[in-house]
Amino acid sequence: MSVLVYTENQDGRFKKHIFELVSYASETAKMLNCSVTALSTGKVEESELMKLGNYGAGRIISVENSLPSGLDNRAYSYVVSEVAGKTGATVIILSDNNTGKAIAPGLSVRLKAAVGSGVSRLPLSTEPFVVYKRTFSGNAYAHVVLKTPVRIITLARNSFSSIESAGNPSIEKMEIPVDGALVTTTIKEVIRQSGRMQLSDADIVVSGGRGMKSPDNWAPLLELAESLGAATACSRPVSDEGWRPHEEHAGQTGKIIAPNLYIAVGISGATQHLAGVSSSKYIVAINTDKDAPIFEAAQYGIVGDAMKILPKLAETIKKR
């Protein structure tokens, strides 16, 4: 019996949320009194793989050459299911991002395993196996019982802290042939965004809404984001009106994000927007309307004119 955690990489490097994922797997394994196996796919240097051991992985399986370079969910689900069978995994943990959401359903079918998606805490119990997740756009929570012998969990980002400890994991190379019929996606060209931080990867996000009144008023918001080393985002009305690019739209119908700090400027806090940002560790709201719904979700709030507040914030942060 073991806990298997799938650790995706970007250009051979693991991002912060992967270490949080392995830490979660390690704490879950302690509850089950078993070990943690980390699965890595693609070319990753041994020094980078060893980092997984610092967060609780006792065994690392590296599958380098069996998969297409781009995510093809059927192929990846097959490989993860094969490794799960070879390692005797009874719990499989993935990130609740695009990759995890793509792999989990196919994995569930292959292993006849129940799925707990968007889980945000350690299991409440192991017999029965009960997980905790937020529901109804973060307005409620549910206790979900996973009754199958194998359980799949997708962990919500920024819902668990990384726990570092000294480790000396074993690294095993494994080759798992993939039937070409499972590979149906062909990548013809990759265009990488440059010059600014990816919204989904940012620890700090500064976001503007219709309360900014005009696209010409965005300069103070951009200045604050630059002083914080933050990514910029916006609400749906702003992107619909062409004030900001559509790729900056954060919310239920845009990008669902979970930064450590989310600063909402001139955003009223519609349910659809909050559904996409409510997993942020801290929310700071700036709005002229003291009754705006955003203040109910925020840990800190400032009632006032953003055009006066933003320059002062940026100036103070630069001084510090």
Image (cartoon, helix red, strand yellow):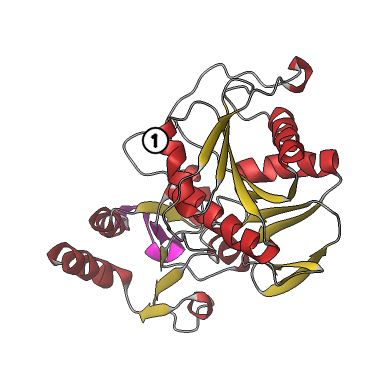
Residue 99 in view of the camera: yes
Residue 96 in view of the camera: no
- Using the image as rendered, state which of residue 183 and residue 57 is in the foreground: 57
- Residue at 48% x, 53% y is 55
- Using the image as rendered, state which of residue 34 and residue 126 is in the foreground: 34
Horizontal arrangement in the rendering, residue 11 relative to residue 114 (left or right): left
Residue 320, image quadrant: bottom left
The amino acid type, in three-letter code, at marker 1 is: Ser
Q: Position of residue 169 (x, y in %)?
A: 50, 43
Horizontal arrangement in the rendering, residue 114 relative to residue 191 (left or right): right
Q: Position of residue 265 (x, y in %)?
A: 39, 66
Q: How many marks?
A: 1
Q: Is residue 139 above or below residue 213?
A: below
Q: Which residue is mark 1?
A: 47
Q: Position of residue 39 (x, y in %)?
A: 60, 39
- Using the image as rendered, state which of residue 47 and residue 281 is in the foreground: 47
**Which residue extends farthest left?**
319
Q: Is residue 5 above or below residue 268?
A: above
Horizontal arrangement in the rendering, residue 177 relative to residue 159 (left or right): right
Q: Is residue 209 magenta?
A: yes
Q: Is residue 123 magenta?
A: no
**Which residue extends farthest bottom?**
290
Residue range (magenta): 204-217
- Residue at 58% x, 62% y is 27
Horizontal arrangement in the rendering, residue 148 relative to residue 31 (left or right): right
Q: Residues within 10 Å of mark 1 (few under 14, many from 20)?
A: few
The secondary structure type at the circle numbered 1 is helix
Q: Position of residue 233 (x, y in %)?
A: 43, 53
